[in-house]
Amino acid sequence: MHMHIELTPGIALLLATAPIGLGLGWYAWRCRSLPGALILAAVAPLATLWALTSIGEVSASTLERKLVWANIQYVAITLLPVGLLALSIDYSGRRPWLSPKHILPLCLVPMVTLVLLWTDPLHHLMRSTVWLDTTGAYATVGRTFGPWFWFHSAYSYALIAAALGITLATTMSTPYFYRRQPLALLVGIIIPSTWNAAFIFAPSVMPAFDFTPVAILVGGLFAAWGILQIRVFNLVPVARHTLVEDMADGVLVLDETDRVVDLNRSAQKLIGRPRTSILSRRIGECWDAWTQMAAPHAAQANQADLSLADDGRRRHYEVKWSPLIRHDRVVGRVVAFRDVTERVLMEENLRRQTLTDSLTGLPNRTLFMTRLEEAIHMARRRADAIFAVMVLDLDWFKVVNDSIGHHAGDALLRSVADKLKRCVREVDTVARMSGDEFMILLNSISGVRDVLPILERIREELRVPVYFRRQEITTTCSVGVVLWDHTYDDPEDLLRAADTAMYQAKKAGRDCHRIFDEEMHISVMRTLKAENDLRAAIRQNRFSLAYQPIVDLRTGTVCSLEALIRWHHSERGTIFPDEFIATAEESGLIVPLGEMALREVCDQMSRWRSGSSPAVHLPVSLNVSPRQLAEPEFAEAVAKRLDEWRISTNHLILEVTETAFVREPLKSKTAMQALHDMGVRLCLDDFGTGWSSLQHLTTFPVQQLKIDQAFISKMAPGNTFFEVVRSLVSLAQTLGLEVIAEGIESTEQWLLLQELGCDCGQGYFIADPMGPAEITAYLEDMERGSCFLPQTPKRYDTQKPTDPARRAPDIHTPAWRPQVSLAVERTP
Ligand code: C2E
Ligand code: MG
Ligand code: MG
């Protein structure tokens, strides 16, 4: 095909367009995963085709040739509108619409147009007349248009209008700040279509030559900038739009006057109004909950907590806002709402668990103490209202637990909790401290007169029986009350006072209350002083051990010694355990004291060993307190001590009382089992006075049973005490336990016990507790042979006052004098 290309500026412009179109297409192809890019890759080369065929048309020398170029050009002209529509659809995020089922029908008109164009000389449906127009700068094809041309134009512009409409909708639905991209595409479509429309409909104002391909390229560059250039994800508007729209977090965009510029679905659901009634309105006007954000916002904070009622449930949100800055100016802010209900509920749950008692749901000690502190704080500020603290301890709760079972105990505690709550007002606090101990804080009372009716109500409520598996359980409680006065600053002091009063109520026979008063205060002070004295004495090691022989009642041989502690007070002289063991127990000082006693026993035994005292062969009984037994690793500590002093475990007997089994049964049993396993013997002391449970004798590994002196002292032939002792001895024998009688003060008692078959005994009649040296002397006396029990027992432990009434009168004229000797053969 002969043609001559003259490089005029117009031709140059078209020539330049051609590679740009191809380049743009190639680049768009590379970015084809972005919305719109794939279609752009197909459309851009059409512009190149249009440009090249335009050059061909201008440069061809004959009309026929020009018409061939013009016809080829129509491939681009007819397909471009379809391409633009597809581009706008893809860009709007609706790629699924672009199926062949939809696209092929759209291509029908272009196809018919192309066929009609090539067959135009037969029907002139496209061009009515054609001539070579040489009037302009270039020789072009002059034409008047046929009917199909107009139809095709209308069709093409309809497609372009649809593309514009879709792009415009996308632009509108894109948040204000991110509209640059769809706008670019819009401009990209408007430029070539306007140019082309002007070329067709107002040829007089346009250049004679059709520069539409150039316009397409300019528009294409605009579009490409919009689609490809700004590739940061959050700025790809559609993707961003979808992302923000589908987010679980609510997002609000406000302008600088707090008008809602945009919001996502979650935010709209949160506000609970249609989008249209939120957009462009001030947020405070369309959402009441916004007031919750006012305070933190005023305080320049950038986050706040929001809580909303939703279907009766409360939901919690964490709200954060950040400024939107454009050209160094804050133009608004983005507010994000995150639903943190689950977390808040979990935290609340945790808090509740740490502050409430799991069994009863009542506040626990921690929460009670906080409330108590608050009450003190309040009472200090208001002179007219004081408060009271009550400590309630159920009477005989242990019995319920032990006899009916723990489930019954739990049921009882729960019912007591409910009853107590019913007895007080909303403003008061009922708490469970531990076990069967409850506390009540009575707020805003004027005096003791307000407390008494509550106490009465509690008594009445508790008297109503509780049923557990058809078993009726009734309970009573002992209550200690303290009324606040300005001398109390520390909540612990108040609790201690209420506790003291409660113990007084217990002492007074239970099922009653005591109000903490001056007398109790003095007694508390006395106890405190006693504790302090004891503590100082322990520090200064002012204790020693006295040893009382325990003899075989049949043969009179000494079979062991009981170690008994003595306190050597600088002013008061020797103090006996009755006066300080209880204080030591209550204060916990019994633990270091017991530790000291154990050390002393071991030390003494090793001294006897090195001094060849006859006592070296005798096992020593040491009293241990329930608290010591409950200490973790008590058995290990004993083992360590014995090992340290190289004392055989069978030389130590530990005396325990039943209190240990009742207070800490598990821990005591574990410790006793460990001691038993290592070979230490265990003796159940003071049997008959406490719980005297047969069960204790069988479940705890004891080898000796010591009958309390109360029975021995009151024993007379045929009386009840005698019978009790008889049954205790036979019980011990049945269980294979060695039985010891303590507090033998007369020959008669000795004989009676012998008659009953009691194995061993101790008492002033036989020998007093003595110091280590005296014990050695005493035993050496025994050893020197035929040593009889003194007619009048020799008193070693002279300071210990003996109740003369308890001493049997016949002790001075014994009818029978047992012989006492050493139980163990001495090695020469
Ligand atoms: P207990 O273990 O039942 O010891 C027997 C108590 O009876 C001793 O009193 C002893 O001196 C006294 N006694 C001995 N023979 C007679 C008698 O014929 N008539 C009378 N009326 N009393 C007699 P003590 O030494 O005052 O000890 C009292 C309690 O103190 C002991 O009772 C024991 O429970 C406790 N105790 C003593 N030493 C210790 C110790 O080292 N640790 C612990 N935890 N408690 C100890
Ligand atoms: Mg004892
Ligand atoms: Mg005893």
Image (spheres, rainbow, N blue to C red):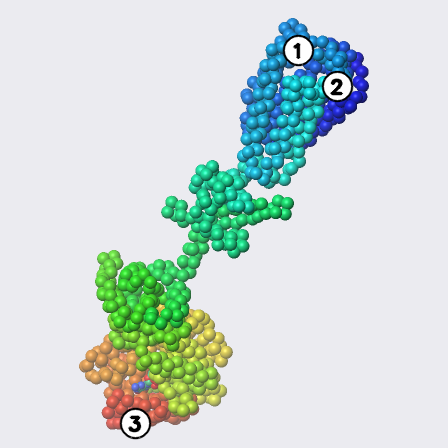
In the displayed structure, 416 sits above or below 314; it is: below
Local secondary structure at mark 3:
loop
Q: Earlier in the sequence, mark 2 or mark 1?
A: 2
In the displayed structure, 7 sits above or below 269; it is: above
Q: Residue at x 59, y 17 (%)?
A: 154
The quadrant where residue 160 appears: top right
Q: Is mark 1 within 8 Å of ligand 1?
A: no
Q: Residue at x 29, y 94 (%)?
A: 791
Local secondary structure at mark 1:
strand
Q: Is residue 637 visible?
A: yes
The quadrant where residue 699 appears: bottom left
Q: For this view, does 54 lie left or right of residue 743?
A: right
Q: Is mark 2 within 8 Å of ligand 1?
A: no
Residue 724 locus on image (x, y percent): 23, 77
* Residue ID for mark 3: 792
Q: CA distance from mark 2 to mark 1?
A: 21 Å
Q: Which mark is residue 382?
A: none
Q: For this view, does 1 lie left or right of residue 529?
A: right
* Residue ID for mark 1: 144
Residue 669 locus on image (x, y percent): 38, 69
* Residue ID for mark 2: 55
Q: Nearer the viewer, mark 3 or mark 1?
A: 1
Q: Residue at x 53, y 46 (%)?
A: 257
Q: CA distance from mark 3 to mark 1?
A: 157 Å
Q: Earlier in the sequence, mark 3 or mark 1?
A: 1
Q: For this view, does 782 lie left or right of residue 200?
A: left
- Which quadrant is the C terminus positioned in? bottom left
